[in-house]
Image: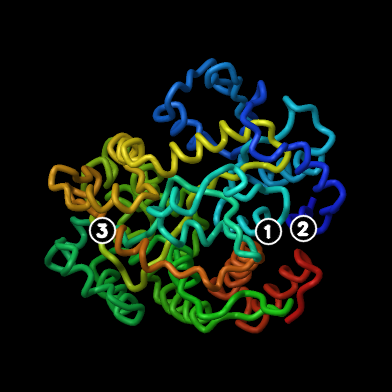
Amino acid sequence: MKKKVLGALLVTTMLASMLAGCGGKSASNGKVLNIYCWNEEFKSRITDHYPNYTEVDATTGKIGEVTVKWNITPNENNAYQNNLDATLLKQEDAAADDKVDIFLVEADYALKYVDTEYTMAVKDLGITDQDVANQYKYTKDIVTDSKGVLKGLSWQGCPAVLFYNREVAKEVLGSDDPAVVQESVKDWDTFVATAATMDAAGYDMVSSVNDTYRVYSNNVSTKWVVDNKIQIDDNIMKWVDDSKKLVDAGYAGTHELWSDDWSKGFYPEGKVFCYFGPAWLVNFSMAADQPGSVGNLGQWGATVGPQGFFWGGTWICAATGTDNVELIKDIMLQMTTNEELMTGIVKKDDDFVNNKPAMEAMAADTSYSSAILGGQNPLAMYCEGAESIDLSNLSAFDQGCNEEFQKAMKNYFEGNADLNAALDLFYKAVEEKYPELTH
């Protein structure tokens, strides 16, 4: 099933029936709350922080008299979206206890779902603009449909920064102070120049040029697709030029993110100066729990880097046809607007939460620090980054275009194709994925 299947298969009469079955703002809840997601993250937040949640087993819980069923399908090979798509297409005829109630989406493909009637407007759950006034604007923009209707909420904010190895910074740059390091990575030309200095000292600037891609792609001035025509932004092409320089000079590899080669720099012997990412990357995805890793030794530092950006996040959407309107409303309000609860998430889970007063208070709290970041409190940096994120150039084709562009350019970086041939590979792949597009 192709990723665009939901948009192509909407049927007005079916949706009218689904909406009628929802019963508007019904005060009652069904017997079963079905939650669709791709990993354990949201489940752990509910288990640890949502009031009155009782865990029954790995895939089942209880909230009062309602049974919560966790339907978890990993993201690999688009399995989560394929399963969700197939299930939503059967939503109208499904028994009440089998209907999707909540499903989660990521930024890269959020518009695919929120720009359809398969997602309920949060206002139809009884959630007001005032309720979500303290959330970061960009987190609402991502799940706002083409008609300006808000269709989901997130407990997270994911502004991202540059994480650098403090020991390498002291050895090569003379200091691990974030302000000093920032001067060596303040823009892309300076970043590439510093890569030469790192190389001379025996270190890769980044593990892979794919590490920097999201920073460039988050700072474009045009959308990937306008009027069904593919266009490549100048900042994306700057990534190509800068990455080719880094690879040709041996300052960075072309490893896939999450691969074993990419992860080597999580340890001192990997000899990698920096990675780019949000709080969840350094806290949960860079081996901080492994003895001897850079994070476990408290030897990462954080600075802004060449450009601000964001990476990831998880949004809670209510499925049209749910019989658990009131419970979903409470889950959304508790998990994404309750300042005390969200502060608890920061303290327990090191997450950056989607509540400006909570994050600003903790950014000013001298008692809060990150052991992974050598005692640094990075929250003020994250807060500033979250306020500056601009998603005006988001499009429904971003996931496919970004994935295929990086795949195609790998051929160019590794010398298996010239630039024009690599671009042709990109256009061909995207037009096969989205037949309605041309270039």
The residue that label 1 is drawn on is 115
Residue drawn at x 62%, y 61% is 399
The residue that label 3 is drawn on is 302
Where 179 falls versus 338 (above or below)?
below
Q: Earlier in the sequence, mark 1 or mark 2?
A: 2
Separation (CA) of disc 1 from disc 2? 8 Å
In the picture, the disc for residue 7 is 2
Where 228 falls versus 16 (above or below)?
below
Q: In x, y percent, where is residue 398?
A: 61, 65
Does 63 sit left or right of 13 as displayed? left
Where 27 falls versus 393 (above or below)?
above
Q: Quadrant of residue 145?
A: bottom right
Q: Earlier in the sequence, mark 3 or mark 2?
A: 2
Where 209 falls versus 320 (above or below)?
below
Q: Quadrant of residue 284?
A: top left
User: Which colour scheme appears in the figure?
Assistant: rainbow
Separation (CA) of disc 3 from disc 2? 40 Å
